[in-house]
Image: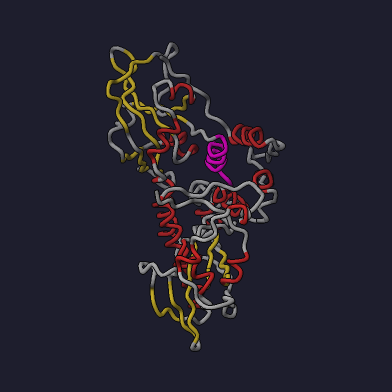
Amino acid sequence: MFIETIPRPTKKDIARDIARILAIPEAEMSRGGTVKSDFLDRISEALLGSSTNQEDTYRKAEFVLSGLGETYDPWWDTSEAQGPTGGGTVTTRAYSRIRANLAREQRCFAVPGSVAAGREESHTFNGRPHRIPLAEAGPGSNLLFFEETSDGYVATGVGSLLVTAPGWTDPWKIQWTYRPFETPLVFDSPFGLPSGVFEISVASFESFGTATAELESTNSGRAEAAIAERLTDTYKVDDVRLNSVAIPPRSDVGGPIAALTEVAYTEQNTGALKPAHDAPTFRRPQNRALSREIERRGVQLAHRALTEDGWLLERDCQKDGVGYDFVYLKNGRRIHVEVKGIQGTRIDFNLTPKEWWRALTDEDWLLVTVTNALSPAQSTISVFTGNQVRAAPRSVVSYRLAM
């Protein structure tokens, strides 16, 4: 058993891999070695059939990453958190995360015991050499922990990178998961090993008996949720640009109120249902912690938009299970508002049976979507009536069986 070290990839190397995976032209590079931003548009075109339609390089990066189900990090994916001095840079980490997502394969690193003990999941690093590889690879990267002993190199466990604190100022805080081997594994390196943290091949990592996909599943999205929490704590709701909302007239439900059991479960024939769209679908967040953060931010932004339009919150129904989240009042009119926070720009979401029932039967029910809900800069509010929801293409995504 031995470890194969690999050179630190440049931004151009990573962009070349992305182009190969998507079968698109390679990125053009600026004189300073930066990938020109139209490459992000080509990535979007390959996945969705259209450009990002964004002029700002930060928003281009956010569009692609969010669409892939990755939480955009303005501290590490771009230079946006630096403010006016940021210069519109899209970092090596952003492209590394895109490549890892498309290839379904995380980068792998070896962490010597002289740098940090794996069993301690929170660390403080001093000095850039240990940080650079992990900072450029980003959350989700796989880690192999080892010690150098009199008998040679001994692998002690594996883990996954969770959080890297923003900035380069010492001390630099980092968090990872750790799973020790039941029995430490001895391995060889005929030419010795680099000092500090260094990158290894995926094959080397998997030779220790831990598939990268298996390890990634144990992470359960903690890294993405941590980025989202830091982002929403730093960029306040009032600082995000929002469009104004216009509340439409009441829906025509087309008849008397039906019983919930009659309308929620009768459309069993999937042949009558159309797919939501023909274009490839980006991945959506599958972990609860991240979904809760997206939904929480979406609710805050929707509330701000509605109150700015003169609506008064009368009742919070989020825990009542009535098929909508809030009741708002304005000039004697009440509306029943269901809010959907969405990570990317594409409006697709799930409805519960009770929410669907409300769309069918409640003329005061409205759906408010908040796309780019985690954006530090701009989110978009859209309002749909029950009529529009009923007319939208839909697809069956799950079944409930009674045996």
Predominant secondary structure, magenta span: helix
How far across and how far down the image is residue 54, in percent? 65, 56
How far across and how far down the image is residue 74, in percent? 50, 52
Q: Residue at x 64, y 45 (%)?
A: 47
How far across and how far down the image is residue 98, in percent? 56, 41
Given the current orientation, which residue lies at the most extreme bottom position? 332
Relative side of 90 to 182, left or right: right
Q: Residue at x 58, y 66 (%)?
A: 389
Relative side of 37 to 154, left or right: right
How far across and how far down the image is residue 27, in percent? 68, 38
Q: Residue at x 43, y 11 (%)?
A: 190
Please, is residue 246 above or below residue 278 in the view? below
Residue 140 visible in rendering: yes
Please, is residue 251 above or below residue 339 in the view? below
Which residues are the magenta region?
89-103
Residue 193 magenta-drawn? Answer: no
Please, is residue 128 above or below residue 81 in the view? above
Residue 239 visible in rendering: no
Relative side of 324 to 395, left or right: left
Q: Quadrant of residue 179?
A: top left
Viewport quadrant of the N terminus: top left
Q: Nearer the viewer, residue 236 or 192?
A: 236
Q: Quadrant of residue 294?
A: bottom left
